[in-house]
């Protein structure tokens, strides 16, 4: 029984380890609605910019918004010969060639007319097309399950190449011409044949080769990177070919971080060699040869719509397209990869609820206000996290552990709660100490310190909406330039200007400009009669300053606006925002 318990602990530790996996990219899979089938075996962008997706049930042309589907139609010779699409290529005349499980097809992209072909190799008709490739001269090559053929556009016929009998009755899986004009022919069971541009055999690489041996004879992909290095993908790993030194360097699960050996496709993207496998995408740095898993599909981290990757394509806009076996098409570009998801609560196995205000401690630590779990620290480089409770005895909603505002300075994190309390958190000791408790309970939403050393506190209160502390003493009430008391209600956010004045965002009174030297208050509201003082909405949710010094203000209901002693620019849903409620 003791051994069974130990085994359970080991299995559980593996589960936890898998849950902690975070991939650097989250792919978008929102284009699968409308696609003919979810097994995407090949992806190609034609000269007109259309994307073509080969599936097991039809060919899909995508124009950026919608699909046009090509299928076999019984009795129609001008339809595709078969619905199981294997490969796509375009010839020098602008015709699209489609390989299927039963026949070759040519689509005239100008007229959209389809012509069917049967490929003849050594006198025999073969219709099972494995791959199609257009070389640098514009010649079209067809790899079939029975050999290699080249299309002759002059007489609309095919010429077969046997390489002195080596390719007779041999399945040709991939064809590639390198930057020197040499051809690499990858097969299903004989490895790789290297030929010159006249199809004269130069070398043969297989598991039986004495000097330059590859790790498997079932070849799936061949690629040349920007450094002119040749890479060969197989059913058992990756091979780097060094012709200058007559060496082949293998990469498998046994000697590298390539955890899955079933390599299906290769492509270069953002200076990395991407490796599509049966279990996600791996990234290889050609300089260091370091391999990391960049995308996968597991219970906690579905950065892909399916784990089994079959096809890559990088389009003209540098968007990376990925075809999966059962999850359709995924894509990733500079827009979809702007955001990286962080889940610090997973490390702690807790449900922190809503994350609120965040303050930064150099070099890489965030202090985050939570709804019920107090103060959360998170190092976004190491993924280490920890939470600190203001009141460890109370772990339920609407308690002291609900923090609404945080502010970091000199080893201390200031925290405002929903109880009208301000706490100082000592980072060294990990302890809270009560700094001030207001006579009424309310949510404190903002804490800042100005250049004079005055601590300003804003919150959801009429009487205590804006208060300040000088030398740790509460100044009450605030007075104007004629020493009359004034009150500002429901302050949600604050920002100190470069001239020492304060910008205050209220949820009811709009944007307020407070000159603490002159004790003057200027209001900007939606009802202002003078256009200079009129803003889109009175509910101010945030104020921020960009690196260039521009100040932007967000509202709940009126979008965002740029502020410089008045509104300079407004952006709403009409200008492209997803919503006016920020």
Image (tube, grey):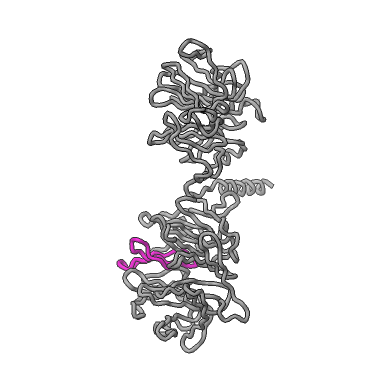
Say whether residue 235 is magenta.
yes
81 left or right, relative to 160: right
Q: Is residue 264 in sight in this rendering?
A: no
**Residue 510 relative to residue 135: left or right:** right
Is residue 411 placed above or below 310 in the rendered structure? Answer: above
Q: Is residue 312 magenta?
A: no
Please tell me in which quadrant of the rendered image residue 387 appears.
Answer: top right
Q: What range of the chain is rendered magenta? A: 222-247
Q: Quadrant of the C terminus?
A: top right
Give residue 526's quadrant in the image: top right
Is residue 372 shown to the viewer in this render?
Answer: yes
Nearer the observer, 409 or 112: 112
Q: Position of residue 49 (x, y in %)?
A: 45, 64
- Extreme left residue here? 244
Instruction: Reply above or below: 73 against 63.
Output: below
Count of number-bearing discs: 0
Q: Is residue 274 above or below residue 162?
A: above
Image coordinates of residue 502 in percent, x first then y, are 45, 24
Q: Position of residue 182 (x, y in %)?
A: 34, 73
Query: Which residue is drawn at the image coordinates 52% and 21% (left, top)?
Result: 457
């Amino acid at each position: 029984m003791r051994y069974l318990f130990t085994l359970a602990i080991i299995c559980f530790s593996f589960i936890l380890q898998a849950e902690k996996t975070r991939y650097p990219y989250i792919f978008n899979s929102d284009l699968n609605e409308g696609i003919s089938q979810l097994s995407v075996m090949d992806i190609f962008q034609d000269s007109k910019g259309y994307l073509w997706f080969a599936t097991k049930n039809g060919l899909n042309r995508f124009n950026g918004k919608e699909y046009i589907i090509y299928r076999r139609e019984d009795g129609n010779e001008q339809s595709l010969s078969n619905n199981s699409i294997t490969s796509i290529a375009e010839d020098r005349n602008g015709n699209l060639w489609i390989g299927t499980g039963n026949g070759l097809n040519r689509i005239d992209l100008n007229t959209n007319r389809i012509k069917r072909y049967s490929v003849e190799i050594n006198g025999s008709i073969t219709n099972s097309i494995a791959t199609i490739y257009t070389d640098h001269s514009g010649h079209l090559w067809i790899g079939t399950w029975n050999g290699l053929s080249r299309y002759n556009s002059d007489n609309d016929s095919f010429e077969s190449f046997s390489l002195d009998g080596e390719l007779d009755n041999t399945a040709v899986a991939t064809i590639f011409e390198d930057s020197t004009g040499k051809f690499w022919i990858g097969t299903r069971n004989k490895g790789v044949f290297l030929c010159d541009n006249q199809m004269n055999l130069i070398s043969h690489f297989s598991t039986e080769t004495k000097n330059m041996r590859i790790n498997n004879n079932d070849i799936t992909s061949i690629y040349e990177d920007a450094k002119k290095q040749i890479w060969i993908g197989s059913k058992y790993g990756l091979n780097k070919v060094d012709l200058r030194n007559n060496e082949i360097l293998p990469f498998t699960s046994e000697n590298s971080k390539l955890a899955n050996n079933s390599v299906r496709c290769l492509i270069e993207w953002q200076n990395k060699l991407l490796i599509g496998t049966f279990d996600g995408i791996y990234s290889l740095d050609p300089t260091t040869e370091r391999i990391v898993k960049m995308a996968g599909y597991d219970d906690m981290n579905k950065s892909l719509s399916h784990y089994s990757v079959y096809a890559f394509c990088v389009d003209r806009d540098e968007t990376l397209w990925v075809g999966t076996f059962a999850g359709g098409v995924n894509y990733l570009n500079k827009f979809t990869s702007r955001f990286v998801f962080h889940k610090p609560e997973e490390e702690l196995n807790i449900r922190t609820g809503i994350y609120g205000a965040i303050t930064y401690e150099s070099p890489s630590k965030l202090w985050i206000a939570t709804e019920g779990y107090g103060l959360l620290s998170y190092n976004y480089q190491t993924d280490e996290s920890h939470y600190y409770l203001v009141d460890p005895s109370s772990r339920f909603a609407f308690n002291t552990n609900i923090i609404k505002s945080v502010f970091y300075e000199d080893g201390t994190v200031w925290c405002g709660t929903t109880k009208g309390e301000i706490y100082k958190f000592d980072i060294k000791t990990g302890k809270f100490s009560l700094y001030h408790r207001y006579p009424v309970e309310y949510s404190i939403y903002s804490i800042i310190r100005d250049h004079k050393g005055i601590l300003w506190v804003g919150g959801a209160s009429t009487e205590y909406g804006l208060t300040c502390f000088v030398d740790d003493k509460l100044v009450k009430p605030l007075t104007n330039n004629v020493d009359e008391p004034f009150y500002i209600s429901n302050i949600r956010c604050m920002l100190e200007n470069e001239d020492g004045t304060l910008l205050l965002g209220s949820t009811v009174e709009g944007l307020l400009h407070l000159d603490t030297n002159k004790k003057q208050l200027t209001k900007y509201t939606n009802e202002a009669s003078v256009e200079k003082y009129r803003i889109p909405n009175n509910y101010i949710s945030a104020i921020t300053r960009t690196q260039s010094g521009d100040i932007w203000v967000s509202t709940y209901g009126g979008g965002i606006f740029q502020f410089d002693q008045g509104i300079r620019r407004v952006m709403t849903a009409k200008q492209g925002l997803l919503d006016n409620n920020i």
